[in-house]
Amino acid sequence: MGRGGRRHRGRSHRNQSEESRENVPKPLKSDAYSIQNRTWSNLEFEEYYKEQRIVKAEEWDSFIEILRKPLPAAFRLNSNGQFCDEIRSILENDFVKSLQAEAVESGEVEAIKPLPWYPNNLAWHSNFSRKEIRKNQTLERFHEFLKLETEVGNMTRQEAVSMVPPLFLDVHPDHFVLDMCAAPGSKTFQLLEIIHESAAEPGSLPNGMVVANDVDYKRSNLLVHQTKRTCTTNLIVTNNEGQHFPNCNSERALSIASEKYHHPIDQLLFDRVLCDVPCSGDGTLRKAPDIWRRWNSGSGNGLHSLQVVLAMRGLSLLKVGGRMVYSTCSMNPIENEAVVAEILRRCGCSVELVDVSDKLPELIRRPGLKKWKVHDRGGWYRSYKDVPKLQRDGVLRSMFPSGKSDKDSTTTGGGSISGEMASISSDEPAEEVCDLPLERCVRIVPHDQNTGGFFIAVLHKVSPLPDLPEKLNQRRNMYTRGRNSSEKSSYEEVSDTVVTQPEDTIEEIVVKEAAASDNGLKLEKGSTVELAKEVAPVQGKWKGLDPVVFLRDETVINGIKRFYGINDESFPLNGHLVTRNSDTSSKGNVKRIYYVSRSVKDVLELNLAVGQKIKVASVGLKMFEKQSARECEGNSCSFRITSEGLPVILPYMTKQLLYATMVDFKILLQHKSIKFLDFVHPQFGQKAAEIAEGYCVVILVDGTQKLGSEAVKVNSSTIAIGCWKGKASLTVMVTTVDCDQLIQRLAC
């Protein structure tokens, strides 16, 4: 129970952050009303952003007008998808032309077009909103096309501006990447695509990996569902609070577990960090118009401290020489430039703001603001010294451009109340201007390219972060705070208690406190903890999450290798298979086996060595699933290959393979189950009868290849499906949607 206070604050973060992520939640049923009756204005919103001067006065009407229009639909092609080139060709040569008449009728120049700044025509913009695409009968064929391709994983519907941060990260295939606040997962999907793009050949696995984290368990389930379509072994989905994401350092955790697990890495640091933080979300007004009604300036102020802490934690987990992107879907400088300025002030010369003005030249962007004001219930403040003392729990020094405090403006215990309540005097001071290079930040405003609003800052870590002794003092005193401090917002409390020191300079007391907290121990004042006395980790440490267990049972592993003809040298299974069940014996209840890449394997072993600090919600790729059919009882292998695992393992299989011509392949897809004698080519039916009963793979070959020839070399264009070979028939083991999609592909 030692972490009860911190976990309570985490729940409050979760509730607030759910309102502001990329997929802004729908209004409650009680708030439902027709779009015609919605309020598309908010006087406080307009006054706030006019005062902040986020656009020029002469642009204001264009800016506010486009915010009141629905957001056009945008989508992105999966660059690693088997049919990527074909889908892109259909868009370019079919829908661009066939939808043009509808565009002209709606007053648009083009119906759909590729986003000019996204590489290789892989991202597209439609001049129709998502509702128009769903409701308009003339767009029905286009709508069905989008639905099908999205469902089978060839396409992702994603807001255009949301696609930008991963492009600025400059991810390489060997990078370790952390997505700190990842749900719903469209950016994670993008990052995985980039990592896999440089794979040498089909089935080869990159050396890099992505850790996708989200504090909310339900949202992390959405993240798992979204990324499942990538068919990747290089992903770990975690369920930690971003501001407390563990620094897994086995050199500090002198535990029994670290001696048991031999891990090749001793600390988890990342080459790239995406810090797309919870925000007020007013950049999404066009797709979430309910925000008009709910918007107030306090939302951004309330999230500011959490955003700073999340960004600092991201930087502490970043390798020297690494890059972090900080982003929000908010237009508020308190959540954007003020956070970046505070980061730069805390980090000094160890972090620099990167100028990315030469990247994505066709993306229209504005420079970051250098001056802004802070608004609270007491009015507008140009400087922190103007903030009354009683207001300083909600208006923080770090929100202002200079980030400076004025000690002379605070009164001591005997100060006058009237002085404390005073607001800005009639003799207004000069407006503060930030002396940091905030013009290097990227602001995307909606009326420039018919998008939503977005903010991006690219940060480069050039050296270890400096010590922040004041934070250490706050950590030491966290148990001795007075009653007055309990009145602070939860976000300010987090800012006070989270240690943001770099990985190599944290004082011994903080290391001991962190170790004690991670092991469920409560620290009393003045107490110490011996790290060497840590208890060995217990499987299933995190309540509600199944344990991650390496499958060591040689009977199961060797049975899989023999049945499918897999050579351990070309595709190693030992050490790469994990389950979510602690009983991994051959007689146990293991139903699903996941395959993990070498990089994920190393991180899992490190996590076990340091006491399972990372809460793993999902890991790797589901490769094998236990088959309950009676045919398995006398078979050496009762595990079939999953549809998502097949593309990865197929190049390494030498058994249970069948080669079908187009006519037999189509018949199998259409009828789902066919007797051996009913195939058009008798040779194919004979081969099917000869292989062992159980799971098999049917590979489509062209007419020039003989059915009885040697194995066909698998490449990116190979089309294959999983089947179950019974005593007298073959049965397809893919979903109806996948079957229909393949039938349509083969008909072209």
Image: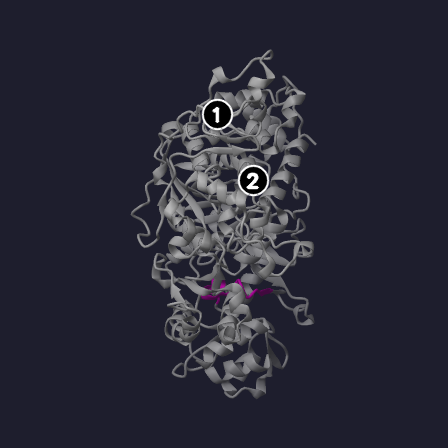
Mark 2 = which residue? 299
In the rendered image of this protein, does residue 146 appear above or below residue 63?
below
Of the image marks 2 and 1, the number of the one nearer the N terminus:
2
Image coloring type: one colour
Calculate the distance from the C-alpha at mark 2 to the C-alpha at mark 1: 19 Å
Where residue 4 is drawn, which disc sits there?
Answer: none
Mark 1 = which residue? 384
The percent position of residue 706, horizontal first and vertical second, equals 42, 82
Of residue 740 and residue 606, the one placed in the foreground of this image is: 740
Task: Describe residue 706's horizontal placement relative to residue 226 as left or right.
Answer: left
Q: Furthest-front residue in view?
A: 426
The percent position of residue 549, horizontal first and vertical second, equals 61, 48
The percent position of residue 486, horizontal first and vertical second, equals 65, 26
Residue drawn at 55 percent across, 79 percent down: 669
Q: Furthest-top residue in view?
A: 414
In the rendered image of this protein, does residue 608 appear above or below residue 432?
below
Mark 2: amino acid: Ser
Residue drawn at 47 percent across, 38 percent down: 314
In the rendered image of this protein, does residue 53 appear above or below residue 522?
below
Tell me which corner region of the image, top left, top right, bottom left or bottom right, holds residue 630: bottom right
Mark 1: amino acid: Tyr
Q: Which residues are magenta?
A: 640-653
